[in-house]
Image (cartoon, grey):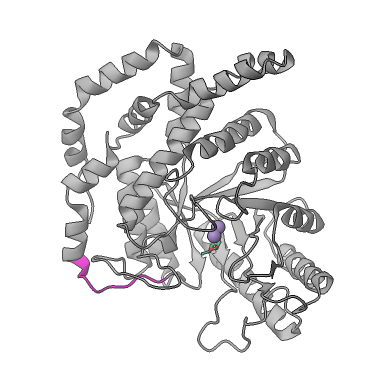
C-alpha cells in the first residue's frame, strides 16, 4: 500500500496554528540561526531500518505474529517506504543475508528508488546454520578451530559483499556470535588469531570505496566469553585490517552502566567509529524501543556524536541503523517511536551551547557544565522535529497519522493475517 500525500497534508493542516505557536515558544529560548541550523540537520538525518525489524520480533521463549507481516523483501521495503513517508527519516534499508537475498536485484533497486530508500550496510549471518550448508557454525564461524567452517564463513561474507555491490551498498557489517559458554572451551589467543586472519581475508575482497564495520558484544548467545567482546577488541581488529575497517557500536552490546558516550568519543578521536546501532535496554541486548528506558543516556551519547561530527574530520560519516525488534508492538509503530526518540536526542545535542560549555570547562565550573547540558536536554525539541518533517512532506505526528489512516488494517487486508517475515 501507499499513503497519498494529500492524506498526510490534510491531517497536518489541522495542526497548523498549534505548530506555529509551539515553534514561536522555542524562539524565546534559542536564536533563529541555531533553530534554522538544527532544523536543517534534522531534515538531513537518515537512519537505516534493518530488514529483520519489520517482522514480529521474538524472544528466546516466543514469537507472536501480528497481521499483515511482510512476506517478502519487496513488502519489507514497502513498509520502510511507509515509515519514510511519514517520518522522512528512514531513507535507507540494511539487509541481512541470507534472510533477505534479493531475487530480482533490478526490481528491488527500482522499488527502493521509487520510495527514496538507499541500501545501507549489508549484514552477514554466520550465527545460524543454513539449509544445505556443508559446515555448521555450532562451534563458531570466522574464529572456529575448524578450517572448513572458517572458509565457509569467509566465503559467505564475500558473497554478501557481492550482493551489496549490485544494490549500491557501501559497507559490510560483521557481527559474530562466536564465543564460548564454558571456561576452557577454546583458547582465547587462538580464536582471536583466527578471527583476525578471517577478517583480513574478507577485507582484502572489499571494494575500494567500501567500509568494513566490526561489531562487538560482551555476551549472548554465549555466556562465558565472546570472541569480539568489546570496543577494544573490535578496534584492534579494525586496525589490523586497515584504513577501511571501523568499529561499530551497538547500544545494547554493553554491560550495565558502561560509559558508552566515552567509548564514542574515544573512537571518533581515533577516526575509527564507523557505525551505530540504536536500541534501548534495561539489562542486556533487550531490543527495546530507542529512548524507552534511558533517554538521558541517549542524549549524552548524541552529545559526543555531535561533538565528533563537528570536530573530527578524521572520522568518516557514520552508518546509522535501528537494531531493535521486540515482540509485543506493531513493528512499524515501534520503529516510528524509535526514530522520534533518536531525533529528539540528536536535536537536544545540537542545541547544547558548546562555546559556553567550553568556557565552563576551562573555568572548572562543574555546576555550570551540568546546567548547560541539562538546559538542552530539558528543552522540548519536538516542534523542531515537526518543522523538519513538515518541510519534507512528512507527517506532523507520524504515529497518530499511521493510526488514523489505519495503515495496519489495510496491510492485513492486502497481505492476510498469517504471513511470516524472515528474520529472528
Ligand atoms: C545482533 C547484532 C547484529 C544484528 C543481529 C540480528 O545482536 O546486534 O547487529 O545483525 O543481532
Ligand atoms: Mn547490532
Ligand atoms: Mn544486538
Quarter of the picture holding the C terminus:
bottom left
- Is 399 situated above or below 226? above
* Tally of numbered tags: 0
Is residue 41 in view?
Answer: no
Where residue 383 appears, x then y in whole percent? 34, 25
Is residue 398 covered in magenta? no
Which quadrant of the picture is home to ligand 1? Answer: bottom right
Is residue 158 in view?
Answer: yes
Quarter of the picture holding the N terminus:
bottom left
Horizontal side of residue 335 vs 214, given as left or right: left
User: What residue is at 50 percent from the left and 66 percent from the top?
Assistant: 96
- Is 51 situated above or below 135? above
User: What residue is at 18 percent from the left and 28 percent from the top?
Assistant: 13
Where residue 311 appears, x then y in whole percent? 68, 28
- Quadrant of the image occupied by residue 9: top left
- Is 422 situated above or below 303? below
User: What residue is at 53 percent from the left and 29 percent from the top?
Assistant: 349
The stretch in magenta equals: 414-422
Magenta stretch, main secondary structure, is loop
Where residue 65 appears, x then y in whole percent? 29, 69
- Is 374 situated above or below 148? above
- Quadrant of the image occupied by residue 328: bottom left
Residue toward you, 308 or 392: 308
Is residue 419 covered in magenta? yes
Residue toward you, 311 or 111: 311
Horizontal side of residue 60 vs 262, given as left or right: left
Residue toward you, 276 or 61: 61
Amino acid at each position: 500500500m501507499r499513503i497519498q500525500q494529500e492524506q498526510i497534508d490534510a491531517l497536518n493542516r489541522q495542526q497548523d496554528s498549534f505548530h506555529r505557536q509551539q515553534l514561536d515558544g522555542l524562539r524565546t529560548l534559542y536564536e533563529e540561526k541555531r533553530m534554522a541550523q538544527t532544523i536543517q540537520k534534522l531534515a538531513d538525518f537518515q537512519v537505516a531500518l534493518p530488514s529483520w525489524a519489520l517482522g514480529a520480533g521474538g524472544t528466546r521463549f516466543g514469537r507472536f505474529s501480528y497481521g499483515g507481516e511482510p512476506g517478502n523483501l519487496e513488502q519489507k521495503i514497502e513498509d520502510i517506504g511507509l515509515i519514510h513517508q511519514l517520518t522522512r527519516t528512514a531513507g535507507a534499508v540494511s539487509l541481512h543475508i541470507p534472510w533477505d537475498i534479493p531475487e530480482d536485484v533490478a526490481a528491488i533497486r527500482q522499488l527502493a528508488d521509487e520510495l527514496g530508500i538507499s541500501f545501507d550496510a549489508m549484514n552477514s549471518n554466520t550465527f545460524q546454520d543454513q539449509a544445505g550448508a556443508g559446515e555448521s557454525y555450532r562451534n563458531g564461524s570466522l574464529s572456529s578451530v575448524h578450517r572448513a567452517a572458517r572458509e565457509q564463513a569467509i566465503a559467505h561474507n564475500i558473497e554478501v559483499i557481492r550482493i551489496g555491490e549490485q544494490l549500491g551498498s557501501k559497507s559490510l557489517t560483521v557481527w559474530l556470535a562466536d564465543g564460548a559458554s564454558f571456561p576452557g572451551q577454546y583458547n582465547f589467543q587462538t580464536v582471536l588469531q583466527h578471527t583476525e586472519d578471517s577478517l583480513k581475508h574478507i577485507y582484502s575482497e572489499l571494494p575500494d570505496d567500501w567500509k568494513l564495520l566490526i561489531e562487538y558484544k560482551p555476551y549472548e548467545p554465549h555466556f562465558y566469553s565472546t570472541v569480539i567482546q568489546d570496543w577494544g577488541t573490535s578496534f584492534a581488529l579494525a586496525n589490523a585490517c586497515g584504513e577501511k575497517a571501523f568499529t561499530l557500536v551497538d547500544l545494547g552490546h554493553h554491560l550495565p552502566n558502561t560509559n558508552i558516550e566515552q567509548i564514542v568519543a574515544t573512537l571518533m578521536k581515533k577516526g575509527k567509529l564507523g557505525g551505530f546501532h540504536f536500541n534501548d535496554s534495561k539489562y542486556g541486548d533487550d531490543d527495546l524501543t530507542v529512548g524507552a528506558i534511558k533517554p538521558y543516556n541517549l542524549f549524552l551519547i548524541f552529545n559526543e556524536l555531535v561533538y565528533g561530527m563537528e570536530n573530527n574530520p578524521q572520522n568518516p560519516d557514520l552508518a546509522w541503523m535501528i537494531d531493535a525488534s521486540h515482540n509485543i508492538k506493531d513493528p512499524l509503530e515501534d520503529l516510528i517511536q524509535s526514530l522520534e526518540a533518536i531525533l529528539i536526542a540528536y536535536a537536544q545535542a545540537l542545541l547544547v551551547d558548546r562555546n559556553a560549555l567550553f568556557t565552563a570547562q576551562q573555568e572548572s565550573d562543574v555546576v555550570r557544565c551540568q546546567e548547560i547540558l541539562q538546559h538542552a536536554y530539558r528543552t522540548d525539541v519536538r516542534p523542531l522535529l515537526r518543522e523538519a518533517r513538515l518541510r519534507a512532506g512528512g507527517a506532523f505526528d507520524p504515529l497518530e497519522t499511521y493510526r488514523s489512516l489505519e495503515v495496519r488494517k489495510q496491510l492485513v487486508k492486502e497481505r492476510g493475517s498469517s504471513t511470516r517475515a524472515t528474520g529472528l
